[in-house]
Amino acid sequence: MGNIIEVHDLTKKFGEFVAVKGVSFSVEDGGIFAFLGPNGAGKSTTIKMLTTLLRPTSGTIRINGYDPVTDSDLARKSFGIVFQDPSLDDDLTALENLELHGVLYRVPKDTLTKRIDEMLTLVELSDRRNDFVRDFSGGMKRRLEIARGLLHHPKIIFLDEPTLGLDPQTRNHLWSYVQKLNANEGITVFFTTHYMEEADRVAKTIAVIDHGLIVAQGSSDGLKKQTGTTSLEDAFLALTGSAIRDEASSSLERLRTHGRMWRGSGRRS
């Protein structure tokens, strides 16, 4: 089995700042590949280059055999993507968002209706299909974005923090479906996550990126063996010296800090 993603000496500079520093890696066709790194390590920048949203400063990329720079349209047809930042149209309903995506990707009309029903059932939004997205919670929007990314049966699905903010039951449900797609249809999965247990349980290959460099790559067991640790989190800490913290935890800490400052000022909270 060959590689569906090939990256060689990929670099991205923003002025004098080098966000990605000559990374090289490959993803096997039909594999599940996880990118782990602290905030600001270069994960999202790399994904944006792979998915035609950023032009590399140097290096080469092949997505399903296509160069995202010179063959951007053909490359885009090969993948679906769930961005870390919201990308839905709040002024459309859930159904209309999915229908628009289906039209843009030329999903046959007779297939599209069935596929939309499947995706809305998967993410438990069938009863909200005709509601405007602006009335959805953050978690509901994320679930709809995942449904949209899988709608056109792509060969590759890029998931940038796909389950951030979702409850554990929904997270497990979504990963079970993604694994089933991978096993039954051979879809390649490339994801980043703040949840170590997701990478440990789901990924076949893990690349650890820190300060724009890939510092280690292999299976979860291989990374543990390399670092002499017993958990993926300990292996990650040994390799980077940094802990991954999700946005919810960071926000909670900011609220706690603000609360302490507020109380210390003599005002009532």
Image (cartoon, grey):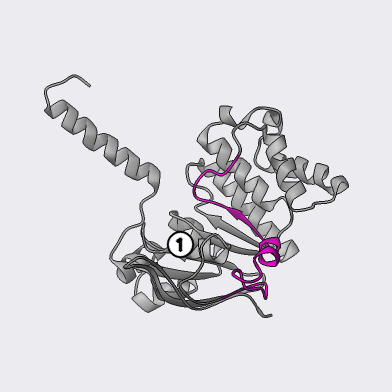
Q: Quadrant of residue 3?
A: bottom right
Residue 117 position within the rendered picture, expressed as x and y whole percent measured from the top left = 77, 40
Is residue 24 positioned above or below 112 on the image? Answer: below
Tell me which segment is drawn in magenta.
61-88
Q: Nearer the viewer, residue 115 or 107?
A: 107
Going by the image, does 19 lie left or right of 113? left
Residue 249 position within the rendered picture, expressed as x and y whole percent measured from the top left = 35, 44
Q: Secondary structure at mark 1?
A: helix
Name the residue rendered at 28%, 65% in the picture: 241
Q: Nearer the viewer, residue 243 or 37?
A: 37
Going by the image, does 262 lie left or right of 195? left
Residue 165 position within the rendered picture, expressed as x and y whole percent measured from the top left = 48, 42
Residue 100 position within the rendered picture, expressed as x and y whole percent measured from the top left = 72, 43
Q: Quadrant of the N terminus?
A: bottom right
Is residue 76 rendered magenta in the image?
yes
Q: Which residue is mark 1?
A: 45
Toward the top, the furthest residue is 268
Please count the marks in the image.
1
Is residue 76 positioned above or below 28 on the image? Answer: above
Name the residue rendered at 56%, 56% in the picture: 159
Disc 1 marks a residue whose amino acid type is Thr
Is residue 141 positioned above or below 60 on the image? Answer: above
Is residue 67 rendered magenta in the image?
yes
Q: Quadrant of the C terminus?
A: top left
Q: Nearer the viewer, residue 103 or 186?
A: 103
Toward the right, the furthest residue is 110
Name the residue rendered at 65%, 51% in the picture: 149
Is residue 143 positioned above or below 78 on the image? Answer: above
Going by the image, does 228 lie left or right of 53? left
